[in-house]
Image (cartoon, helix red, strand yellow):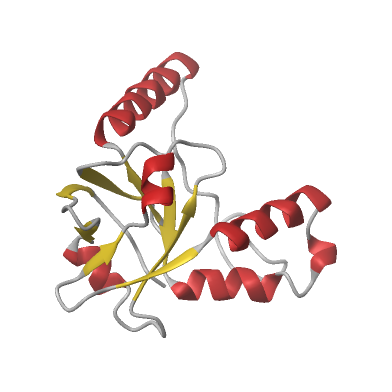
Amino acid sequence: MALFLSTTVNKVDKKGRVSVPAPFRSALANQSFAGIVAFPSPELSAIDACGIDRMEALSASLDEPDQYSPEELDLAQLIFAQAEQLAFDDTGRIVLPKPLGSRVYITDEVLFAGLGPTFQMWQPQHYETHRQNTLKQTESKGISLRLRPIPRGKNSSGGGS
């Protein structure tokens, strides 16, 4: 599974090409499509992106629609309808389609933000505003990120009586 970490800002050229960060390209190296899948974020002024494997896994999971609410199925339909496969050129660039970039105010720079199994592309100042708002909310509500406990089965051995 691809893992996307860090934040990088890259320039967009006059033809709409932008270099995807090398660590992101490396994370996608063994996939069946040499590029990314990108679509407008349903919640934020950003572009959500991932490898084709994640989209294939989502597609396969939709074969069991009883696991999803009608609203989740509507969201999946929207994501697939708006998703675009953006192939890497020989230097690791993609062409960012104007409708996709302009929807989130990307013009001459793209900020790539790793989110673990996915990443986002932002207009840099919009990302900074989002980052600051997230930090303020985290501080005011005392939010911290924690790992879920490892589940213990009935027959698992471990400490305790």
Residue 161 shows up from this direction: no
Quadrant location, the C terminus: bottom right
Between 13 and 115, the one lying in front of the other is 13
* Vertical comparison of 25 with 77: above or below: below
How far across and how far down the image is residue 145, in percent? Answer: 44, 38
Residue drawn at point x = 16 percent, y = 53 percent: 13
Residue drawn at point x = 21 percent, y = 65 percent: 23
How far across and how far down the image is residue 51, in percent? Answer: 42, 70
Between 27 and 40, the one lying in front of the other is 40
Q: Is residue 68 left or right of residue 148?
A: right
Residue drawn at point x = 28 percent, y = 54 percent: 5
* Vertical comparison of 13 with 57: above or below: above
Residue positioned most to the right: 66
Residue positioned most to the top: 140
How far across and how far down the image is residue 141, in percent? Answer: 49, 18
Q: How many marks?
A: 0
Which image quadrant for residue 108?
Answer: top left
Between 97 and 158, the one lying in front of the other is 97
Quadrant location, the N terminus: bottom left
Residue drawn at point x = 57 percent, y = 43 percent: 42
Residue 103 shows up from this direction: yes
* Vertical comparison of 54 with 40: above or below: below
Q: Is residue 27 left or right of residue 69?
A: left
How far across and how far down the image is residue 74, in percent? Answer: 74, 53
Which image quadrant for residue 97?
Answer: bottom left
